[in-house]
Amino acid sequence: MPTPRTKVRRHPERGNYERETINAILDEALICHVGFVHEEQPYVIPTIHARDGDLLYLHGAPGSRMLRDLGRGIDVCITATLVDGLVLARSVYHHSLNYRSAVVLGRAHKVTDEPAKLHAMECVVEHIVAGRWADARRPAPSELKATTILAVPLDEASAKVRTGPPLDADEDLALPVWAGVIPLELLPSDPIADNGEPLPAYAADYGRPRG
């Protein structure tokens, strides 16, 4: 159910509060944007995230101002957006995008237990490239110590989704102007090897999960 803070007010018909929809957007998006206030100055920082059940993990260096502030329990707003198509209407006014977005509100807490930190780092790696964790060297104790992990509960979140064709005004439907949707998709190019090792399947067949 939406909360007063997550209820979609502009185009409320596009609001979606199902956890399955929210999870799928967070899982497909490669990065999120983290909004917070530091000394009365708002900041929005792009960062890698990973969802694990009802938690959203953020990670980075201990010296990160964002992670230091969030670790103290300040309010945070996290967003992720996927663009699925360019919607070209007959009139400029009705041009739009097909998109899926998620907003998470809450407060973060530090993950300090070593097994829990390792698990969170595995989630982050697997979020980017599924299958990579089992193939690469695991973090050394010094590297684990040099990494801050924060967890944000997904207790207060919402999604907003637009799909479908352009929505022109009736009086514009007869205009001799092409209208429709140009679909967009994130597709990988051929992997570029750094050594002579055989190309693993997760690199050769890479693709993002589609919710």
Image (cartoon, helix red, strand yellow):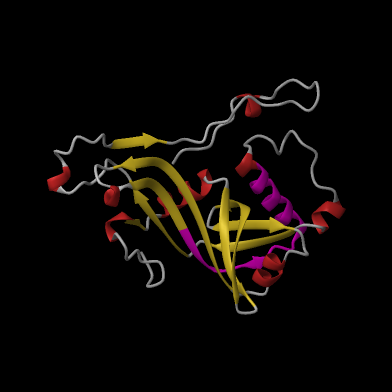
Residue 164 x, y percent position in the rendering: 29, 41
The reply, left or right, for residue 118 in relation to residue 29 is: right
User: Which residue reaches farthest right?
Assistant: 142
Residue drawn at the location 81% of the way across and 58% of the way down: 146
Residue drawn at the location 58% of the way across and 30% of the way down: 188
The reply, left or right, for residue 58 in relation to residue 140 is: left
Looking at the rendering, in which quadrant would you find the N terminus?
bottom left
The reply, left or right, for residue 14 in relation to residue 118 is: left
Q: Which residues are magenta?
A: 103-125
Residue drawn at the location 40% of the way across and 66% of the way down: 6
Residue drawn at the location 27% of the way across and 57% of the way down: 13
In front: 116, or 166?
A: 166
Question: Does the magenta-highlighted stretch encompass residue 113?
Answer: yes
In front: 19, or 168?
A: 168
Compared with residue 83, is residue 107 higher up or lower down, i.e. above or below?
Answer: below
The reply, left or right, for residue 157 in relation to residue 174 is: right
